[in-house]
Amino acid sequence: MPSLGLFLSQLFNGLALGALLALVASGLTIIFGTLGLVNFAHGALFAFGAYAGFVTYGLTHSFVLALAAGALVTGLLGLLMEWSLIRRYYARPPEDQILVTFGIGIVIVESLRMAFGGLTQNVPQPAWGRGILNLHYFFYPVYRLEVLGIAALALFGLYLLIYWTRLGLIVRAGIEDPLMVRMLGIRVPRVMTLVFGIGAVAAGFAGVVYAPIVSAAPDMGSSVQVQSFVVVVIGGLGSFPGAVVGGIIAGEILSLTSMFDPAYSDVALYALMALMLFVLPRGLLGTEGRG
Amino acid sequence: MSRLRALRAEGIVLAVLALLPWVAPALHVPADVLTRSLIWGLFGLGFDILFGFTGMLSFGQAAFYGTGGFVSAWLLTSGTLSSVPLALLIGMAAATAYGLIVGYVSLRRVGIYFAMITLAFGEMSFFLENSPLAAWTGGENGLPGVPTPSLGLFGHVYAVKAGWPLYAFIATIFFAGYVVARRIVASPYGVVLRAIKSNPRRAPAVGHDAQRYKLSAFVLAAAYAGLAGGLLGVFQGYMPPDAFFLSTSGQLVLSTVIGGRATLIGPLIGAFTWIDLRSVLQQVPHLGAAWKLIFGAVFVVIVTLFRRGIFTISWNPGDVHAVGVELPSD
């Protein structure tokens, strides 16, 4: 059996990774809930955010500015994506929506590769995140704790946005009954553009936060995207609480199983997903979805 | 006469495949580019039955491509088998069996869920290959030393060498796969598959067990993928782990859509487009990685403006759609 210290430190790793996955997946789930499409470019937006943060950090040497710029620029890219292409797809079959976002994702990732090369770019941890903390039972890197805090704060921000603002009200109403929202005279297309932008902000922000842990690379988003898909399958597609719960579960599975045998950690995650499909095909908190 | 007309597509494909060894060198297209395209084309025949004809967008086909490839390659490199065709068949059978399991689970959800779940199973298969099964698959290194086939013809043993002989071997298999796929989509069974695509609710309502048809299409696609994966190892003399990559599944989707869905030959044309573009751009400094950017941008344009792909823009084969009953196009 692993020691208590190892167990606790893996538990924290799982929480930090889980909060990050929850953030990425909640962007995915908000977009799906409102727009009815799954964004296959979500991983690319994650990588784009990491690079935007990397460039900003190089220019300003401020991690806070890197976070802000990464989130903002990715959000703008999201607005542009929705406004230029994705809105033309709402009336088309779901397969076409997947294909176009998948294609946009390739264009983003390959543009990053052309601009920065295929090698990984090291993004330094912020000055206030360096060092190791003695938590009595185990030593733990400060930055990972901060990742947990930052991601939790961002999730809380999203929660406030969805449940306590007028825009959030429209978004939730749109998930329930899009036709009625339109009949009430709300300019749905503008809301949809904005929602896609918010989803992109969540992915880009998570990308900046994650970059110091793994380094930025053009393909860094692809495994995160698949994991966030698993998160929404577990949590229920279109449900914000589902994304949070699913994210934590996925993060814990990935890190707790790697304590026993790292070779099986990813496999265990997908095995859980397969199990969920048998027991609860709609996910933990999913409703009768559009899928 | 109508029987002959129905075989027109087969005749054209056969003629083009047979003429290419004489035409391609004049156009500066190497044999390896064509052989690799044919492997992708074979991989795409099954995928087109699944996606183009039945309407199920899977992002996890690499799982079966890799399974077929690694099972065949392991049989040949471990000394278990010496016959390449037999190893290819066993690899194909293994991929088919795996397709049955994955399909059974994935088909519990449809549409976007199906795309996400197959993507996840594709990734799971990569991780299985990469670590728990690394003792057999070589993990990140793959399996080197896959032999080329030796065929017994009229008492002589003929070793198929790399280059045009291997092209001929793989082109023959592709052509056989193409003829079978044409038979499948033109059969009453194929008509039901298209009915499921054009109206997923109506097909079961008129009494077809849609779930079983979908599963069978999924298994068929896995079988084609497994055979293509086995050929990849034979072609390269090495079975690479990137057969299991997500990007392999994605590349298949790109090839099929760019070439033209529901045409059977579209994936081959789409694959040839990027494989040739890549081999040309690799000789240009600083542009070696640009092929995928170009290909991705072209893909977005095609999905947005020309839904039926380059093949159907340039030449509509008509007879693929004119079999049996006429179904409304989507």
Image: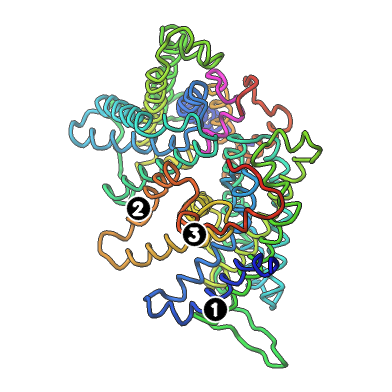
Q: Where is residue B3 in the image (x, y as percent from the top left)?
A: 70, 67
Q: Give the residues drawn in magenta, as a range.
A: A226-242
- Residue at the limit of the structure toward the bottom, as seen here: B155
Which numbered disc, 1 or 3, marks the residue that appears first in the sequence?
1
The quadrant where residue B322 appears = bottom right
Residue named by callout 1: B18
Please tell me whether residue A285 belongs to the stretch shown in magenta. Answer: no
Question: Which of the two discs, 3 and 2, sits closer to the camera?
Answer: 3
Q: Left of B97 or right of it: where is B77?
A: left
User: Where residue B147 appears, x then y in whole percent?
Assistant: 59, 77
**Magenta stretch: dominant SS?**
helix
Give me the residue at 73% from left, 61% from top.
B93
Label 1: how many Cα within 10 Å (few below 14, some 14–19, many 20+): some
Q: Which residue is tagged 2?
A: B294
Dot 3 and dot 2 residues touching (CB under 8 Å): no
Secondary structure at numbered mark 2: helix
How many angstroms separate mark 1 from mark 2 (CA)? Answer: 30 Å
